[in-house]
């Protein structure tokens, strides 16, 4: 019984060992402890400017000395945006794939070595005709393998790409690299638009908050007048309640505006790589964007749009890959040389050199290459359909974005005139209210109209700027060109 207990304890001890646990447990442990995982997360949090213990004593980020300009925000995004960093790493992966495909055309060198220990040397006896040796002499024994034997081999093999398989594989990898470069540019434009959109959204939220504070000031003044008229018996209780409810709604709207400002600031900080809760202030932008002609925008987009260009490069990659695969069905020739050396004293010489030329031919009797080739042709045809779809989607997006930008510019021009008209309408309504010729609802309607026009005036310019940046990205042009003159 004691022996069985010892065996059980030994089994439990082995089961607790990390190497045994890695082999025995389906989940394993990956070699990382909980402390190691925590330390890794802390390092990533530091790099991401995220505080894992927000309730701690970490100081709040200090405000910037000057408001952040749009050009500076785009510049910060180039170095701090995580999606851009991922796209750059993907381009590095594609570059390594090109190097791997190119390396298949170069000579490959393999070295092998071995030192063997055996219990005895291998020998064989020599059978001689009778009477050849003196009487009593034992037949000689020949050693054919030493007891201890070391061997060393070096082989250089140069592919002879007579079929062109490797060259087409290299062309496919290079097309993949160009496609990743186009996708990196597409990601750059996309994130620039994200930064610009977040920047103008923050400005828009701040302007809307200012409009809301103006509305509250007007409604408080209106409530004061209504209270005076109610106290003098010239206004009903219902009309006074209407004004009070309108003021409460405006005050609640102010809270929503404060939250919208916070959300816009968080989005901007996230896009440019600053701490998410950094107290970022932005500089106002007052210029109006200019729009190209729709036909010009479409021509430029068809020629320069990076998403479309990436699909075209993908088409070349797929077709080159299919050609390389079809060439793999031909014989693969190679030539090279080898050097063999050993420590044996049985054979002479101990070092020999060899040159060789040969081929390998996969006759595809298992039809696997044929199936892969059919898949490659189907993938190329699928990508052609994607190119066609992208062309249609690009035209729709350019026309829609151009139209949205033009509409916002028209709304801006209309609001510049409408604000003055709405202010005059409110003035007239308040005078009518003071003499009893207008009700509280009439004054509140006039205030809502003024607030609407002020909000349109405050936001149309920023929304037009955002749509113009989106159009620039669809055209495949640097969004920074829009920032050269302050836009």
Image (cartoon, rainbow, N blue to C red):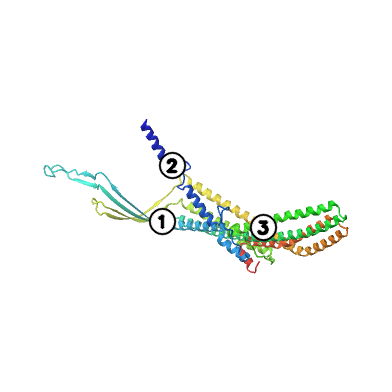
Mark sitting on residue 21: 2
> Residue at image x 73%, y 53%?
252
Mark sitting on residue 261: 3
Nearest the viewer among 190 and 226 is 226
User: Is 216 on the left-hand or right-hand side of 173?
Assistant: right
Q: Position of residue 23 (x, y in %)?
A: 43, 42
Of the two numbered discs 3 and 1 on the same chain, state the one appearing first in sequence: 1
What residue would you read off at disc 1? 159
> Residue at image x 43%, y 52%?
331
Q: Position of residue 192 (x, y in %)?
A: 61, 61
Q: Is residue 449 visible?
A: no
Label 3 secondary element: helix
Distance of mark 3 from mark 2, alpha carbons? 52 Å
Q: Are marks 3 and 1 in contact (CB under 8 Å)?
A: no
Of the two numbered discs 3 and 2 on the same chain, state the one appearing first in sequence: 2
Count of marks, rendered view: 3
User: Is 188 on the left-hand or right-hand side of 456?
Assistant: left
Disc 3 residue crowd, few under 14, some 14–19, many 20+, Cα 10 Å: many
Q: Quadrant of the C terminus?
A: bottom right
Distance of mark 2 from mark 1, alpha carbons? 45 Å
User: Is 332 on the left-hand or right-hand side of 89?
Assistant: left
């Amino acid at each position: 019984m004691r022996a069985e207990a010892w065996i059980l304890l030994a089994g439990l001890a082995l089961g607790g060992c990390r190497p045994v646990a890695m082999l025995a447990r389906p989940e394993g442990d990956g070699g990382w402890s909980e402390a190691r995982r925590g330390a890794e997360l802390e390092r990533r949090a530091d790099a991401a400017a995220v505080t894992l213990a927000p309730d701690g004593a970490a100081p709040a980020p200090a405000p910037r000395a000057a408001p952040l300009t749009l050009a500076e925000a785009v510049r910060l995004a180039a170095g701090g945006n995580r999606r851009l960093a991922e796209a750059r790493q993907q381009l590095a992966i594609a570059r390594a794939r090109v190097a791997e495909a190119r390396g298949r055309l170069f000579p490959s060198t393999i070295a092998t070595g071995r030192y063997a220990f055996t219990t005895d040397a291998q020998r064989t006896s020599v059978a001689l005709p009778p009477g050849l040796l003196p009487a009593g002499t034992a037949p000689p024994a020949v050693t054919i393998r030493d007891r201890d034997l070391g061997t060393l081999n070096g082989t250089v093999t140069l592919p002879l790409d007579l079929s062109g398989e490797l060259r087409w594989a290299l062309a496919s990898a290079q097309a993949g690299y160009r496609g990743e470069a186009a996708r990196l540019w597409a990601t750059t434009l996309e994130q620039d638009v994200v930064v610009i959109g977040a920047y103008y959204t923050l400005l828009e939220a701040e302007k809307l908050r200012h409009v809301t504070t103006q509305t509250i000031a007007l409604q408080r003044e209106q409530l004061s007048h209504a209270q005076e008229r109610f106290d003098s018996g010239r206004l009903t209780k219902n009309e006074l309640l209407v004004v009070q409810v309108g003021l409460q709604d405006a005050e609640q709207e102010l809270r929503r505006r404060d939250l919208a400002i916070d959300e816009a600031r968080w989005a901007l900080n996230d896009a440019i790589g600053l701490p998410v809760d950094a107290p970022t202030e932005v500089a106002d932008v007052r210029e109006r964007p200019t729009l190209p002609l729709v036909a010009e925008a479409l021509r430029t987009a068809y020629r320069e749009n990076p998403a479309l260009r990436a699909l075209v490069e993908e088409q070349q990659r797929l077709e080159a890959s299919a050609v390389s695969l079809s060439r793999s069905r031909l014989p693969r020739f190679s030539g090279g040389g080898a050097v063999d050396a050993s420590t044996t004293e049985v054979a002479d010489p101990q070092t020999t050199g060899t040159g060789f030329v040969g081929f390998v031919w996969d006759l595809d009797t298992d039809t696997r290459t044929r199936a892969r080739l059919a898949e490659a042709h189907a993938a190329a045809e699928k990508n052609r359909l994607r190119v066609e779809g992208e062309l249609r989607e690009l035209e729709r997006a350019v026309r829609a974005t151009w139209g949205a930008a033009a509409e916002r510019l028209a709304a801006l021009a209309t609001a510049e005139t409408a604000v003055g008209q709405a202010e005059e309408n409110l003035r007239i309504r308040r005078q009518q209210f003071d003499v009893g010729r207008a009700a509280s609802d009439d004054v509140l309607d006039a205030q809502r109209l003024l607030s609407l026009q002020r909000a349109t005036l405050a936001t149309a310019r920023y929304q037009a700027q955002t749509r113009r940046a989106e159009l620039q990205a669809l055209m495949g042009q640097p969004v920074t060109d829009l920032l050269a003159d302050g836009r």
